[in-house]
Amino acid sequence: MSQRRTQLLIAAARLFAHYGFRKTSVEEVTRSAGVSKGAFYLEFQTKEDLFREVVTSEFCAYLNDAEERILADQEGGRLSRIYHHSVEALLDRPFLRALYTDADGTMNGILHTHGTDRYHPRILLGAEFIAQMQANGLLREDASPEETSHTLSVLTLGPLLAEPLLRFPESPSLEQTLKSISRMIVASLETYDGDPAAGKRAFHKLKSQMVEALKESRPDGSHRSAPGS
């Protein structure tokens, strides 16, 4: 990937997170990235193309960041720790946080227009991953992988979506809420058996599959001519 393309992606992620898709212009992106408007059209045909690649780039970076945190944690292969590190990594990426909490629908609207199967935020801890954790003795065997996966998705997105609505001076912080959820996962799903290293390997396999799928959905990066108008 060219340095120019990388600069555009970084600038666009920052501007989309702050202003949203509709209020961010190509001119603002190129100015922030320090490149010309003509150079933009050598990399992307439209602002929508840029947005979709920002989604792909941000999710790949997020998945790699989450895995680094999990690997650095001695107990990182346990589901409660995977949940904790995955959400913390998400919170540290303003673009993805804005995408999930898109109140007016301007950002997710672009994803729906161009196909949710390819571009909509994926469920990270899917049923197959949960089943693998069970096979490794890290989770209770009587828990349904499908139900557990769905519940974890709700527990990941729920606090982010509810935060603006339920924020009062006396409310616990979002970080405290996430720690409470992690403790609930320990109490309701985890076992004392199983090697956390097996959980780390299962997450690495999941992450690798998701990164590959995201890269396959990346818009065509070939050079193009600027539009005539």
Image: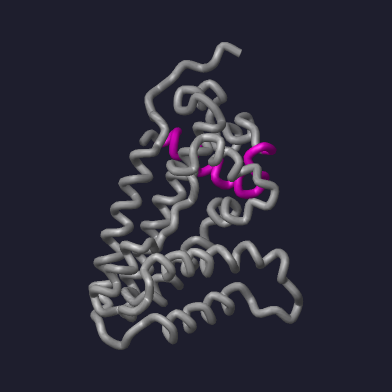
The residue at the point 53 percent across, 21 percent down is 38
- Using the image, determine if residue 67 lies above or below residue 141: above
**Image quarter (top left, top right, bottom left or bottom right) of the C terminus:** top right
Chief SS of the magenta region: helix
Relative placement, left or right, of 188 versus 169 is: left
In the foreground, 37 or 23: 23
Spot occupied by residue 10 in the image (x, y as percentages of width and height):
50, 44
Residue 161 image position (x, y, % from top left): 63, 62
Q: Quadrant of residue 70?
A: bottom left
The answer to whether residue 112 is above or below residue 133 is above
Inspect this view and state whether residue 191 appears: yes
At x 54%, y 75%, the residue is 178
- What span is in magenta? 3-23
Instruction: Give 94 or 31, whichever is nearer the viewer.
Output: 94
Q: Estimate the x, y position of residue 193 in percent, counting from the top left.
A: 26, 86
Is residue 59 placed above or below 226 in the rendered structure? Answer: below
User: Image point 50% across, 24% down: which residue?
Assistant: 45
Q: Is residue 39 visible?
A: no
Q: Residue at x 72, y 66 (%)?
A: 165
Relative to 31, is 42 above or below? above
Where is residue 179? Give x, y as percent: 52, 79
